[in-house]
Image (tube, rainbow, N blue to C red):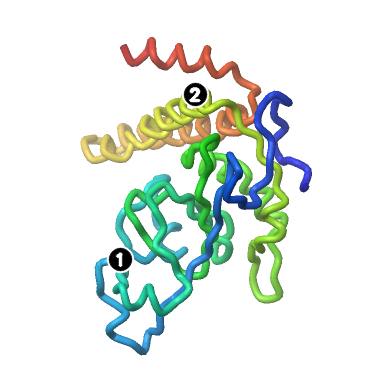
Amino acid sequence: MAEPFLECPKNWVHGTLEPDPKSPLIRRVDTGSTPSTRREDYWDGMIPWLTPKEVTGLVDGLFVSQTERMITEAGLANCAAKLLPPGTVMLTKRAPVGAVVVNAVPMATNQGFLNFQCGPLLRPLYLAYWLRSNKPYLDLVANGSTYPELYRGDLFEFEIAVPPVDLQEKIIQILSALQFVALMGLPLEQSVTSPEEMLAIQNQTRRLATIRDEILPLLLSGQIDICRVSSAFLRVSQ
């Protein structure tokens, strides 16, 4: 087991990213594949098919529901890709390393992903945020002769520790609220009438994004009183 990047409370559930059909954390990990591009009947179907390039084009979002290309049932049946259920955590293992999304609809991917299906004690969004927070660790263990790549054997040794499901959901709510506020700057920029207002909004957006990124590892390592922060967010929203 690799030494954890984030130190977490001992009473949290500890495990690794190695899949086990009976695991409460990671039940299954699949990679993807590309149907033959020489077969026209494998393409332009109804099954979304995701590539790492599309993930890097997302603006801070975690969910993905559409893809640039679609494949057919025949294309899926004649390659190693699998139709992944909604809530699968999709991690890019190369070009780039460590980008992560969660699918909102059934979807397949190419071979540039490791796709995690969670057990009952791990919420997909929590795992997605955890992987984002561990990006420096992912970069450190990635290796390859031509370009950096995450290999299953190295990744499966990672130790992950998670709080009870109800606390995971509180953490997700806090991070989603911070994400929402940080992204509000984008539509606000379209309503300003002066360069000064535009710069003020952009500066505020950068500060909020910095706060979000700084609080992420603190929440995921139990260094912040989750219940207290969650109550504060509820009072603000009421």
Residue 179, relative to residue 18: is it above or below?
Answer: above
Which amino acid, mark 2? Answer: Asp
Q: Is residue 104 positioned above or below 35 on the image?
A: above
- Local secondary structure at mark 2: helix
Toward the front, the furthest residue is 22
Residue at figure coordinates x 54%, y 37% from the top left: 122
- Depth check: 58 or 189 in front? 58
At 30% across and 58% down in the image, what residue appears?
Answer: 66
Looking at the image, do the residues carrying marks 1 and 2 touch, with CB atoms under 8 Å apart?
no
145 displayed left or right of 68: right
* Residue 71 disc label: none
Viewer-closest of 172 and 233: 172
Kind of residue sitting beneath label 1 = Ile
Marks 1 and 2, how far apart at CA: 33 Å
Q: Earlier in the sequence, mark 1 or mark 2?
A: 1
* Residue 202 picture location, percent across and down: 39, 37
115 to 173, vertically: above or below? below
Count numbered badges in the picture. Answer: 2
Residue designated by label 2: 166
Residue 162 location (% of width, % of height) = 61, 32
Q: Quadrant of the C terminus?
A: top left
Label 1: how many Cα within 10 Å (few below 14, some 14–19, many 20+): many
Find residue 141 and report its horizontal and vertical position in percent: 72, 57
Q: Which mark is residue 47?
A: 1
Residue 235, percent from left and from top: 38, 10
